[in-house]
């Protein structure tokens, strides 16, 4: 009976270990996915953006403007923006179960309608775990930082 109890406890511990999410691995996956997304934006890679963004994705800009997945995909396909820089730094990923938030400092430099714009801003990108992997569901960007 004692052996059976020990085996049951070991079995429960094993099942619990399998059910416990690997937060460090989730952080690596989401960090890589967000870096891949930033590169896709820089390259106007609509296919990669489409794969990463959830269908009901929204982005809220610092000025209050709201963009949807459709808006961002259309913008990438039009190639109206030519990106020179779309790189982030100071990336931090936090995971709570099936939700992850990436915060980072973004450096953008692009040309739109003949005008070159360069700025830095902070952003937060929210990802959720779905049956098809992590999806980017919500983004929020600050206003451009001074100087």
Image (cartoon, grey):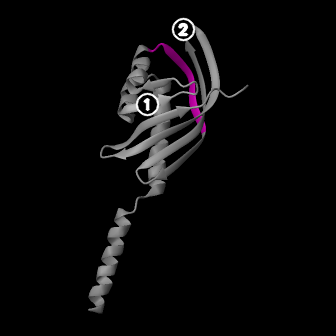
2 vs 1, front mark: 1
What crowding class fits label 1: few (fewer than 14 Cα within 10 Å), some (14-19), or many (20 or more)? many
Which picture quadrant has residue 141?
top right
Mark sitting on residue 113: 2
Would you place residue 47 above or below residue 133 in this image? above
Identify the residue under disc 1: 58
What crowding class fits label 2: few (fewer than 14 Cα within 10 Å), some (14-19), or many (20 or more)? few
Q: Is residue 100 one of those drawn in magenta?
A: no
Would you place residue 25 above or below residue 33 in this image? below
Which is nearer the N-term, disc 2 or disc 1?
1
* Rendered-image quadrant of the N terminus: bottom left
Q: Residue at x 43, y 42 (%)?
A: 127
Which picture quadrant has residue 75?
top left
Q: Is residue 87 one of those drawn in magenta?
A: yes
Residue 50 point in image, percent of width and height: 36, 29
Q: Nearer the viewer, residue 23 or 71?
A: 71
Element type at mark 2:
loop
Locate residue 90 relative to residue 24 in the image: left or right: right
Q: Residue at x 37, y 23 (%)?
A: 70
Cα gap from disc 2 to disc 1, whole angstroms: 24 Å
Residue 145 point in image, percent of width and height: 68, 28
Residue 3 point in image, percent of width and height: 29, 89
Discs 2, 1 touching: Cβ within 8 Å: no
Locate residue 85 relative to residue 74 in the image: left or right: right
Is residue 97 visible to us here?
yes
Mark sitting on residue 122: none
Would you place residue 117 above or below residue 126 in this image? above
Q: Main structural element of the magenta stretch: helix, strand or loop?
A: strand
Please give the range of residues in magenta.
Answer: 79-89
Q: Residue at x 47, y 41 (%)?
A: 126
Q: Nearer the viewer, residue 19 or 42?
A: 19
Residue 61 point in image, percent of width and height: 54, 27
């Amino acid at each position: 009976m004692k052996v059976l109890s020990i085996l049951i406890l070991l079995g429960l511990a094993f099942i619990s270990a399998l059910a416990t999410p690997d937060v460090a691995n989730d952080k690596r996956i989401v960090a890589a996915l967000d870096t891949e997304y930033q590169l896709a934006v820089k390259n106007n890679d609509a296919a990669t953006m489409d794969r990463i963004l959830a269908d009901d994705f929204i982005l809220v800009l610092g000025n209050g403007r709201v963009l949807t997945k459709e808006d961002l995909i259309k913008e990438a396909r039009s190639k109206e923006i030519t990106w020179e820089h779309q790189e982030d730094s100071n990336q931090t990923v936090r995971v709570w179960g099936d939700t992850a938030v990436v915060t980072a400092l973004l450096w953008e430099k692009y040309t739109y309608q003949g005008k070159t714009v360069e700025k830095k801003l902070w952003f937060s990108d929210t990802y959720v775990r779905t049956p098809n992997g992590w999806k980017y569901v919500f983004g929020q960007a600050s206003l451009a930082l001074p100087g």
